[in-house]
Every structure is written in C-alpha cells, then in structure tokens.
Image: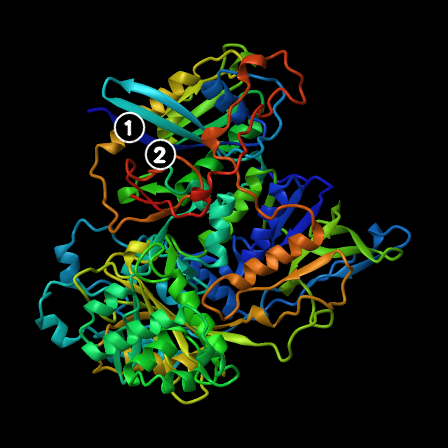
Amino acid sequence: MQQELLFKVLVIGDLGVGKTSIIKRYVHQIFSQHYRATIGVDFALKVLQWDNDTVIRLQLWDIAGQERYGNMTRVYYREAVGALVVFDVTRASTFDAVLKWKDDLDSKVTLNHGRPVPAVLLANKSDQLGSQQPKLDSFCRENGFVGWFETSAKENANIEEAARCLVENILNNEESPVVEREPASLILSGFTNTNKDPLNCSSCMKQ
Amino acid sequence: MAAEDLPSEFDVVILGTGLAESVAAAAFSRVGQRVLHLDRRSYYAANWASFTFNALLTWIQQHQEEPQPEEVQDWSSLLEEGEELIYLSQSDSASIRNVQVFCYTSEEDEEEEEALNTTEEEPKPDSADPQAQTEPGPEEASHTEGDEPESLQLVPPAAQNQSEPSKKKISYAHLVREGRRFNIDLVSKLMYSRGSLVDLLIKSNVSRYAEFKNVTRILTFRNGRVEQVPCSRSDVFASRQLSVVEKRKLMRFLTSCAEETEEQRAYNGRPYMEFLSDQKLGDNLQHFLLHSIAMVTEATPTEEGLAATRHFLRCLGRYGNTPFLFPVYGLGEIPQCFCRMCAVFGGIYCLRHSVSCLLLDTHSNRCKAVIDSRGQRISCSHVVLEEGFVGADRKRTNTPPRFLSRAVLITDRSILPTDSEQQVSMVTVPPAAAGGPAVKMVELSPSTMTCSPGTYLVHLTCPSIGPAHQDLSPLVTSMFRTPESPDHEGPSVLWSLFFNMADGSGLEAEGHDLPENVYLSSGPDAELGHDHAIRQAESIFQKVLPEEEFCPPAPNPEDILYDGDTLGDTADGETGDTIGDITDKPPPPERRDGQNLKSE
C-alpha cells in the first residue's frame, strides 16, 4: 500500500541569502534576480514520489522575510522535522550567523527524546564564487549538521540533492516509534484541504 | 539575525503582542496595510504568554525584582517645527503584582528512584540552581521547603499503599528537567466553541496554525466534594448522581430555555436565582444551572442568566460534550498564530524593541510618527498601544483599577480521577461566602501539551479582593494536599505560583488624552471567553478602515498557483516573483461554518 508522508521543513538563514529563491527554484522551477518578500504564503509544497511505496509532501516554510529580526513565533517552529540553513558564500557575515540560526532552531524544536531535528547547511550563490570554497565537512560534524551543499538557485545546482539528503535523514528519524497523541486533537477547518494531517507522520515534540 | 534599522515608514505601528494587538495586526496586514509590530518584552503575547517551566521561573524573577527606575531619554532634538513629543511609559511592572512561589516537593530525586532510573540524565550543572530560582521573598520564607523540612514528604501514605506502589514522587529537579514540556499560561481562559475567537479563527484561516482539545468535562466543587456537572443530553442520561425525576426536570428546563417565553420575561430585572428557584428544580439542579452552566452569581438578573445559559447550550455539541475548546500547547499560542498571519502578509516583527515617544503634529493633533527606543523616527498613520504604555494621567478607566487573582498549581493527579488520564476539566467553584467571588478553575492534563506526563496543571482565576495568595490559598488547601492541609486526600500540590494581574476590562474605549489616531488596547479580562479582546481589535480596525473587511480568509498555501511558466530570469523585477493567481475565493459556505471539523 502506498503511504503518504507529510514533512514540515524550515528554511532559515539571514536576510537576502536566497531562501525564497531556493524554495521557488525547488518547488516551482523558477528563478528571478529580484524577489520581493513573499506575501501571503506560509509555505510552498513539493510533492515527491520518493519510491514505489512512498509519496512525500514536503512543506517548505519560509521565514516570511518579515520575521527577519530573528523573532520567529512558535507557530513557525512547531512540529518541524527538518531544516535547511542557508548562507550566502559572498557575504561572510551570513556564514557567521549560521550557528545562531542553528542554536535558535535547536532551542525551539526537538524530536522525541530531545534529539535535534536534522539540518542541512546550504552554501548558496556558489555561482558567484570561484571553486576555492573551503570544505565544510568538519564544520558540519562539529555543529550537528547532517550535511552541506554548495547550491545555486540561479543555476539550479545541488538544491534537489540537498533536499534529498534532508529527507533521507528525516526518514531515518521516522523509523523510531511514533508517540501516539491520545486523544486526538481537533483542527478547526476553514478551507477545503484533503490533507490536514500534519502530525500523523512526524514524531516530533514541541519546542 | 543581524540588527539593522527598521524601515522608516509604516501605515500602522502596534506596540504589544497580546491578543487584541495581535488580532489587530493580522487584520491590518491582511488587507495590505504595512504593519510594524513591536514588543518591549523578549517574548510574544504579553500577559497572554505561556512559558516553559524554566522560562516561567525567569518571568517570576523579573516580577519579583524592584522595577528599575525608568531612563527617560531626551529625543527633543529630533523634533521639527510644529511637533511635540508624548513620552510613553517603558516599565512593565504595573500590570503584575504580588508574585509568590511555593515549592512543596523535594529538591532532588529520591535515591531509590535514581537507582531504578539510571538512564535518566542528571540535572545539568549549568541549569540554574533551583534554589536560587525560587528564592523566596522575605514575606513568604516561612512557606518554602527550606524552612519546613517536614513538608518534603508529601506522598500520601494511603496512595503509596494503593494500586500504584511504584509511582514516582516527582521532584523539583524533575520539573526543571522536564521544563520544556510545560506551557504555563499567564491567563486562564477557554474558547467557547461558538464564541467570537473560534469564529474568527475559522473565518480568517488562522485556525490552521493551531490545534485544539475538547474540554472533556465540567466539574463543580460543592460541599467539600468535586462532582461532575451533567450538561449534554447524554451526560444527563448517564448521570448517576441525578434521580430520574431530576433528569426529567433538567431536560425539560434546558429545552424550554432555548426560546424566550412570556414567563421568563416576567422575571426581567429580578435575580436568575429567583427564577430557578421558582422552577422547583431542587438544590442540585439549581446549583448546576446557576454556577456551572450560566456561571453567574446569585445576584445576576434573569435575562443575563438565561442569555448565558443559552450561549452555553448553543456551544454544546459543536465539537464535543462540553461547550469549550482549549488550544494544544496553551493559550499563548493564539496571539502568536495571529502574529504569524500578520508576518506572512508582510508585517514586520521585532521583540525587545519599543517606542519611546509619539510625535504629535500640533496643528492636526495627530500622531505623525513614533520614535523607537534607538532614536529612529518612524512615520505612520495610526498607532495601537497596549494600555501599559500609557501613563495613568492620559488614560480613562473605570476607577479604581481592578485586578485578577491567579494561581497556577502543578499537581500529581487529577482532582477527579477516571479511567482516562487525559481529561481536561472546567471546574466552577461558587463563592465561599455570599457576595464573594466565584473561582474559575481549569485542570489541564498532559494531552494538552501544557504539562509533563504524570503531572496536571491547575489554573485558578477570580476577581481580586486582596493579594492572589490571600484570595485563593483557602480554596487550594480545601481541594488539595499542601503542607497546610497535610491530611487531605486530594491531589498533592508539587509547586504553586500566585500573582495578581491587571483586569483589562476596566479600560474605556474612548476619551483618552491622546491624539485621535492613537488607539488603546487592554490586557486580559476576567471573563472565561475571549470576546473582550476580539471586540476591541475589531473596533480599532473599523475605526481605522471602516470600509475594509475584518480578517477575510487567507488563501490556502496549497491553492496558490504561481504563473511560473510565463516568468523567469527575464521577468520584470518588480513583479517577476509575485504570485500570479491567488485563488483567494472564500471557502464553500459549509466549510466556513466550521462544521467540518477534522480530527486526527
């Protein structure tokens, strides 16, 4: 029987590092040099036919560039199962902020048993730099990232790969027993949406 | 995350992230107003916030300290001709008083427990010293565990011998270690399932950010006992405490309530109590109807009592067997849901950031800009202020200012245990003496994600007569086991917090000494529901934008189509990324009505 999984993934990082570009490239296959802050959109949905038995609906939650001073609401973090942490290779300050974002993430949301949610580091705008980018393997090991990729939303480089890496890690966590929440919670539904089961598949604890 | 200057022009600047301000922020942003939403605190939701156990300890510490004298910075150098400054109050101390904490459980885990539980992680050395965190003020030192070693052994001997010999005693260290599982609300309210908050959540689609639990039962405390109140038809039939005659009478009464009758009108202006008494319902039913269903006092007029009864009955059965819902993770989620909606529609958020003064255009008597705490001038057309920002001299309130008394208890079991450990209970407690305040009590189980497994979170609220501890501790000792009631067979209180909070219902809507485009909003009120804050937000919105719809439904992200095919690198920079086609049509009527409730 085919199973359908729904994962909430956060896309975080400093203003202007290309979070929205990455999401739009990944989900809608478009790229524009000039993004305005995304208005009226909570998340973008990417549907993946993962294997013969599994369809994955990936909700990519942009930080709504507006919450740019780092004051995200708990609503944003709640029930997330993975994160893409993005920095801009051409601006060192955005790399310096990566650990702040990672710490914030780990302090606001954990999986069951208190483990951090898997996070993949994206070195974005790699098209704007030569090939002398330093390797980040040990940085990732030391700081709890499950992997890193040099990405370019403009040239569509490595975004699919980064997402795949994250999903693999999320699925690894899925195999651990899911804690049942009894009795069930209610969702007050205002619109037609056949898939309002954000929690069934993800075993994730509150912040 | 870098600090940077804020943009310097907005339509609406909103100070404070409580419920009324957050709903107003979402409403403005949703219809395209540029909103700047600030809070001087480091957390969202102001006095509506909920905290993890450890964050609550920090909050307590802040409110036990002497308020720092306000540092008034002189921004008059930023004035231009025809402008005046109105300085705002920056201290956050006035709305919370008399904070007192009591810990009745042992400091550390019992030794045998440690031995059984070797995998459990030790308290981290860097987690703040619990002793320091609950350091009592001098006035309460005699109540804390340090001075009362005998209070350390609080597990009832009877309970130990009973069914659960292995039940662990929950230590303070355990509460700290499990602190993240707590979401402790500063206010205690419930959502009427047909109340204005639920209607607004559904109408605006903000409901998608939250999930809810049914309140599963209504209890009342009467003659020293906790009893279940039968309120739905099935409850009435299943009730074992009602006689057959009482059941018939109650059903007949509830049915007859639905419509106003000539007989009822005859009682207008006379107490509801009198009306009930003349129905010859008997003491039991009269108690339930007055205190638990209408939740009014003996002096309330009949028309109000009947209106409250009808509201209760209307809300029954929409989502469950009681009229109430409670948000998973606590009430503090709700303002944040509206903030998220505001941000998604372009609102800018900044915590730990305040406004020092309003800039008044003396010619038009309007506020044309604000000056933030960093001295940045931000122009705006309208300002919404949490009333705490405005000095008493400029505010018009029902004098004298009123307060609420609050208590928060962490207990080790439910006040009325059943087979299910996941009951969420509304408990009404009639006044101990005639004319005294009725206490509203809510007991939350871990299923609401507001307390750790094995504990219950109990919220008590009443209008203040004196300090919260004075108002509420007699009830606590009559319902729970504490060092003052060591032989009580009820649940043991492990930890408790008492405080007074300003009652927001005292603020007048008009008549403040402020520019006409500055609007005041207030903090939580004493009512069980949320109507006051929602009404306030809506009224502010309508004063500013009388033609616009209040919180129209936000589009479902999955319904948004991007016109990706026609756009690309060559697209016009201004519009290249914008959403081509938001299917912003209102949902089908039956959905808007929210009948379609999905449960997982």
**Sequence order check: which comes first, mark 1 or mark 2?**
1
Tell me if B239 is positioned left or right of B436 in this view. Answer: left
**Residue B312 versus residue B428 in the image, above or below:** above
Disc number placed over residue A195 in the picture, else none = 2
Q: Quadrant of residue B281?
A: bottom left
**Residue B588 versus residue A122 in the image, above or below:** below
At label 1, which amino acid type do we have?
Glu
Residue A97, horizontal then vertical, whole percent? 52, 33
Determine whether the residue tagged by mark 2 lies in a helix, strand or loop. Answer: loop
Is residue A203 visible from the viewing direction of this image? yes
Tell me if B124 is positioned left or right of A71 in this view. Answer: left
Q: Which residue is mark 1?
A: A4
Chain letter of mark 1 equals: A
Around disc 2, counting alpha carbons within 10 Å, would you say few (fewer than 14), some (14 to 19), or many (20 or more)? few
Q: Quadrant of residue B248?
A: bottom left
Front residue of this view, candidates B110 and B545: B545
**Which is in the foreground here, disc 1 or disc 2?**
2
